Amino acid sequence: MKKVEESSQKSAYLYCIRLLAKRDYSIYKITKKLKERGYDGEHIEQAIQEVIDLGYLKEENYIEARVKGLMHKGLHPSFIQIKLQEEKIRVDVDYILDIFSQYPMSTCEQVDKLIKKKLPREIDFNHQDYETKQKIKQRVFRYLMSKGHSYSKIQSQFEIIISSNQ
């Protein structure tokens, strides 16, 4: 962690600008970065307020970009909400679903894509012994559940994909 020799509002502001030139940040994340850098709390608040006033720090843009990124990773909307809460961002699931509706990917399509990604291509699932099928199925289910998808949704989509591969 690099400490700032002499904390000032101007140097905190310039560091904010440098960070925001690379990508969007939430207020929480940029505050955390400034604290790690060793700036005083008062200088951090003033610098952040200045970049907000100038329109350089827009939390809405960060939230939308973060939701889209997590959506493309295959995370369920409620799991995205939890991820954002970890970053001290309060977002309603309806807002997340609204962003989902702007893109041609539903949660069913997400589950399909993730199942196909985790199913071994070189092995015909339907021609495997029971034990091998169970191992593959458990691996796929664990992966999708780690992404926040419900067991029932995974089960129904898994059955559809397996039956269509026959």
Image (cartoon, grey):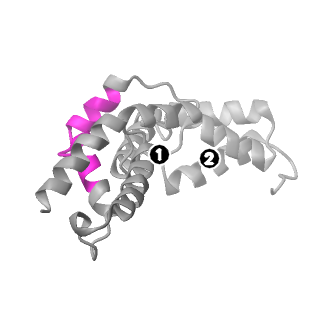
Q: Position of residue 153 (x, y in %)?
A: 28, 37
- Nearer-N-terminus badge (1/2): 2
- Residue 20, compared with residue 28, is above or below; it is below
Kind of residue indicated by mark 1 = Ser
Q: Position of residue 128 (x, y in %)?
A: 29, 68
Q: Residue at x 53, y 49 (%)?
A: 20
Q: Residue at x 52, y 29 (%)?
A: 89
Q: Which residues are magenta?
A: 95-113
Q: Position of residue 146 (x, y in %)?
A: 47, 45
Query: Mark 1 or 2, which is nearer the eye?
Result: 1
Whether 21 is among the magenta residues is no
Question: Mark 1: few, some, or many residues within 10 Å (few <14, many ≥20)?
Answer: few
| Closest to the observer, 105 or 142 | 142
As helix, strand or loop, the secondary structure at mark 1 comes to helix
Residue extending furthest bottom?
A: 122
- Residue 15, compared with residue 44, is above or below; it is below
Assign the N terminus to one quadrant of the image. Answer: bottom right
As helix, strand or loop, the secondary structure at mark 2 comes to helix
Q: Which residue is mark 1?
A: 146
- In this rendering, position of residue 136 left or right of residue 8: left
Q: Which residue is mark 2?
A: 16
Query: Residue 74 got which mark?
Result: none
- In this rendering, position of residue 104 left or right of residue 78: left
